[in-house]
Image (cartoon, rainbow, N blue to C red):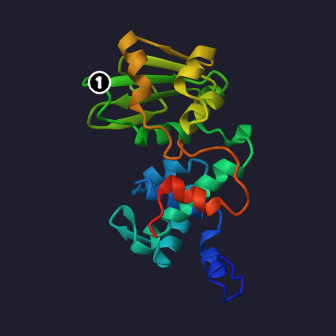
Amino acid sequence: MGASYYQFCPVAKAMELLDERWTMLIVRELLAGSERFNELRRGVPRMSPTLLSKRLNQLVCAGIADKQGDRYVLTPAGEELRPVVDALAVWGLRWIGELGDRDLDPKLLLWDMRRNTALDAVPDDRTVVFFVFPDVPPRNRHWWLVLTPEAADVCDIDPGYETSVTVTADLRTMVAIWRGDTPWQDALRSGALQIQGPEPLRRSLPTWFALSPYAAVPRPAVHAGSGRAEIAAVFGDNE
């Protein structure tokens, strides 16, 4: 647990645990289906392994997660944080300004795309998608997604398979597509995105990815006080 606010308010008591740096992002990763330590690391690539281990132990001690062998699984208390994370995402999309350059991370982008691959839409044969981000430093410029109907894997080194299709775009453009800010077709028409490969693969590639879970969230600003209604409209009101 973090430092106490010494208030009886339940918000204060909850935030003593949840407002420590990285904690809610780890919860986000657990809600997204990551369970093993290395999977969680790929969802928070700029977090040190030592701090990740510490935060996971805190979540286990607090009853938010349970450690089962080499897996971390959310408890019912942890699952109850799902609408909290969803609401934060909606609020962040509506009210936080443009992304800074340091917010753009190819590691997180490709990991997120990998776990949101529509496996029932990919070709029957193994398909290798080669991503090139010309504006990124050389060590993080090239990425590969290896797709089959059974699984998707992301590689930061050449996996040794023949490339099926190549996607070239600035990292900001690809993030905008993934977040739902820019449609695939608009990016292609403008030349900001290029897809090279056999025509059937070029045409079908956008259907292989389900986009960010929050890509469909409406972006226009709303009047103060109406946030609850907007969130209910997006995620459904269970009351």
Dot 1, how many residues are within 10 Å of its Cα: few (below 14), some (14-19), or many (20+)?
Answer: some
Residue 189: image quadrant is: top right
Image quadrant occupied by the N terminus: bottom right
Question: Where does residue 82 sit, x and y in percent of width and height?
Answer: 48, 63
Q: Is residue 57 left or right of residue 123?
A: right
Q: Quadrant location of residue 230? A: bottom right
Q: Is residue 149 left or right of residue 3?
A: left
Work out whether residue 224 or residue 165 is closer to the camera in this orientation and state it. Answer: 224
Q: Residue at x 72, y 37 (%)?
A: 101
Residue in the foreground of this view, choosing between 46 and 34: 34
> Type of residue at label 1?
Pro
Residue shown at 74%/45% (left/top)?
97
Outermost residue to the top: 198
Q: Is residue 179 left or right of residue 117?
A: right
Q: Is residue 115 visible?
A: yes
Give the residue drawn at x 73%, y 60%.
224
Q: Position of residue 17 (x, y in %)?
A: 60, 74
Would you say residue 53 is visible in this rendering? no
Q: Which residue is mark 1?
A: 123
Secondary element at image label 1: loop
Q: Check the image and report above or below for 47 versus 100.
A: below
Residue 19 screen position, x and y as percent = 65, 68
Task: Give the image location of residue 218, x and y in percent.
Answer: 60, 44
- Up the image or down, 65 lies above or below 4; here it is above
Q: Is residue 138 above or below residue 4?
A: above
Residue at x-position 70% and y-position 63%: 225
